[in-house]
Amino acid sequence: MDVELRHLRAFVAVARLSSFTRAARQLVITQPALTRTIQQLESAVQVTLLERTSRHVRLTAAGREFLGPAERVLASLDIALAAVRPHVTLRLGFSWLLPDPWAQQAIARFEQATGGRVELVRCDDPLAEIGNSAVEAAVIRGAPADADRVRSVHLFDETRVAVCSEHSRLAARDAIDWHEVPGWPLVVNTVSGTTGPWSWPAGQGPTQVIETRNFDEWIESVAADRGIGVVPDVAMRRNIHPAVRFIPLTGAPPSPVRLAYLPRVREPLVRQFVEAALAAAGEYRAR
């Protein structure tokens, strides 16, 4: 059996802490798993490195000689990893406006924790970009269409608002109710939109739908008064187009925001970003 880094890490932890229990806790593994790892290492080097009794753990003479070089190997590895860490990049896909301040907080947390960086990739269909490995993770609104293949975590919900042309009769309204929306032509982004005929029970949705394929087509169609749209309120805060007006929407269901990714693809890196995303989401919800 070849000696692996996990063997060295296990041995150094036990040697420095003089305890299998404390070493297992530090390494976040079970004590039986740690014991097996040490036994594998001793079998590989064909000497006993640690003396164990019910009361203590001590290094043997061979263990004392082995400890220094083992620590130097691990230290050299840490130096090598630190050298390449600034080049580690996670690509985050999104179809249009990222929620703020969640996005900035999640990115900052990830970059501070890993030393790497997040590359933002604007794409019309983030789920498709995950599938073809153009991005490692993506912010999506609503449920992923390919839920069996794509894993996702719920971050938070956004409030919906209506948006119309400045020339629309709705532009002077103080508010519009969710049940009024189907009475107007509805502009829908069929690729990554959050609101469409699917948002209502069968037979209760809008009778006239104007289909678009991306955010730019969608907003320009609304500005041209082809119909109204429904979007998360982040669009209202970001002043996305001078020729549209936003109207508070009462009674609308919330718009869920999720982080999607493929399991077992750059797993440690993606897991770290998921952790940063969830921590930032907790702060977002607490606002």
Image (cartoon, rainbow, N blue to C red):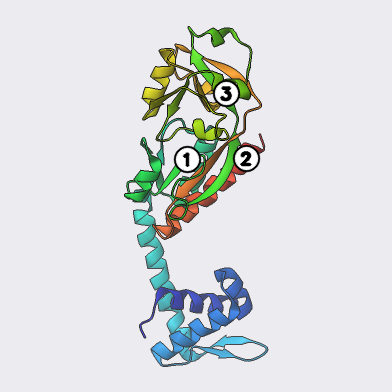
**CB atoms of marks 3 and 2 within 8 Å:** no
| Separation of residues labelled 3 and 2 (CA atoms) | 22 Å
x, y percentage for residue 121?
36, 38
Q: Residues within 10 Å of mark 2 (few under 14, many from 20)?
A: few
Badge 3 marks a residue whose secondary structure is strand
Residue at the extreme front of the image, as rendered: 203
Q: Is residue 92 visible?
A: no
| Separation of residues labelled 3 and 1 (CA atoms) | 18 Å
Compare marks 3 and 1 and give the one earlier in the sequence.
1
**CB atoms of marks 1 and 2 within 8 Å:** no
Residue named by callout 3: 161
Q: Residue at x 60, y 20 (%)?
A: 180
Badge 2 marks a residue whose secondary structure is helix
Q: Residue at x 63, y 16 (%)?
A: 175
Q: Residues within 10 Å of mark 1 (few under 14, many from 20)?
A: many
x, y percentage for residue 22?
62, 74
Residue named by callout 2: 283
Q: Is residue 41 left or right of residue 183?
A: left
Residue named by callout 1: 140
Q: Of residues 4 and 124, which is closer to you in this image?
A: 124
Compare marks 3 and 2 and give the one earlier in the sequence.
3
Q: Residues within 10 Å of mark 3 (few under 14, many from 20)?
A: many
